[in-house]
Image (cartoon, rainbow, N blue to C red):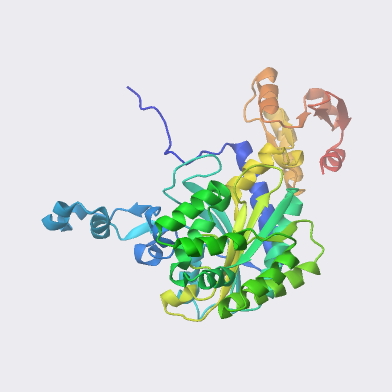
Amino acid sequence: MAQKPSIPKGTRDFSPIEMVKRNYIFDTIKDVFRLYGFQSIETPAMENLSTLMGKYGEEGDKLLFKILNSGDFVSKVSNEVYAEKDSVKLTSEISEKGLRYDLTVPFARFVVQYRNDITFPFKRYQIQPVWRADRPQKGRYREFYQCDVDVIGSNSLLNEMELVQIIDDVFAQLKINTVVKINNRKILAGIAEIIGENERIVDITVAIDKLEKIGLEKVNQELSEKGVSDEAIQKLQPILALEGSSAEKITQLENVLAASEIGIKGVEEIKTLFGYVERLDLQTEVELDLTLARGLNYYTGAIFEVKAKDVAIGSICGGGRYDDLTGIFGLPDVSGVGVSFGAERIFDVLTQLDLFPQESLETTKVMFVNFGEKEEAYCLPVLAQLRKNNINAEIFPENAKMKKQMNYANKKDIPYVVLAGESEMNEGKFTLKNMESGEQKSVTAEELIKILS
């Protein structure tokens, strides 16, 4: 019995029409990245687990896909390890590599490994798939593409400003209405210090990051379960509830965090960044959101999250500043900042809002009908001319029945068909048919190129 074809949960196949749409997203993003002087790199799909583990927090480590060692890996495991039934210990014995969880940690490894070959500040973009052993759900997949843009080797907040501009440019071109939410991990550290729980900054930020998803009551419950005192939780409530414009929130924070050196440093950075942003002519909305925490451990400064205003879906872009990510690979005190565009969610948003431009969906603009060998010889030079003029063109590969050839053109949504039979050949012309209107006209090769260009 033949095996039923299937793919793993949380992964997807993409049809030709879907790939055209995806490439429209990737090409738009790449073009904007290049405008700001960023260059492309690629890193392997798999990294050493020593590179990946411990960089994403305890929850992130659990979501890493591990790769079994080659050969008879079982023979190298002791009976004692088997008897303990400790999956973490066993995994370390049989797996040395894993699929990358994101593009930022491999980027930090790349920077350290090639530090003598690159120019700082190093501005790179990277568009590749990543893998997470997450529970698949709407807008969340186990294999998905990230479109990262980072600058490393500079502390300047101009870099954060440029990232806001890049976000604005990308989504303006894609015609998605967005809001950019910004916070600063130093502010969160200051809040933890003010409420007397600076040792639990990670627990606090992980919980706060879930506020929009699970609500305040459950966040407070999670904080309590993590050991945060009831007094500290009560002190946290008015801070999370701060209202007003971004400028008003910043003013209130200056008072609330006056006793915290790191907190005030974060407020100063946010104040400087919003000062830059106010001078920009942006289409996107930008706001300070103190509940934004982004649970990844390596962020140390500004953090960003972008939401689509017209579709109920998770963030479609996010990122932040990391002051010493390269330090774990032996290159300390090198600051970087970047954001990642979520191609899968952007695809879903564009689909729901019907925002893909129709012209981007035309993989072939014109098809030549095949009437036989003599007609092929007549059409092929013109077909080559069309392609030299960047017009997507093809010829049906067989002298099949007209109905079959026209059905092929219809199913591929090819807007024009060229017919060249005996009468056209005698006149040195071609019949161009508009497949949507049904209109036909007799044209020369030069006129054909002009019409289709």
Above or below for 449 versus 198: above
The quarter of the displayed image where residue 90 is located:
bottom left
- Residue 363: image quadrant is top right
Q: Quadrant of the N terminus?
A: top left
User: x and y percent of residue 147 in the render?
Assistant: 59, 57
Q: Residue furthest left?
A: 79
Asked if residue 444 is positioned above or below residue 176 in the image, the reply reads: above
Q: Residue at x 50, y 73 (%)?
A: 111
**In the rendered image, which quarter is residue 241 located in?**
bottom right
Count the numbered circles shown: 0
Side of 12 where 242 appears, left or right? right
* Residue 35 seen in the current view: no
Q: Is residue 276 left or right of residue 296?
A: right
Q: In the rendered view of the protein, which quadrant contains the C terminus?
A: top right
Residue 300, given in percent of the width and then of the height, sits at: 54, 71
Residue 247: percent from the left, percent from the top? 75, 67
Q: Tell me what residue is drawn at x 79 percent, y 60 percent.
A: 282
Seen at 77% across and 24% down, the residue is 421
Q: Is residue 164 visible?
A: yes
Foreground residue among 96 and 287? 287
Up-down relation of residue 19 to residue 230 (above or below): above
Question: Residue 250 versus residue 238: which sits nearer the camera?
Answer: 238
Q: Position of residue 255 (x, y in %)?
A: 66, 74
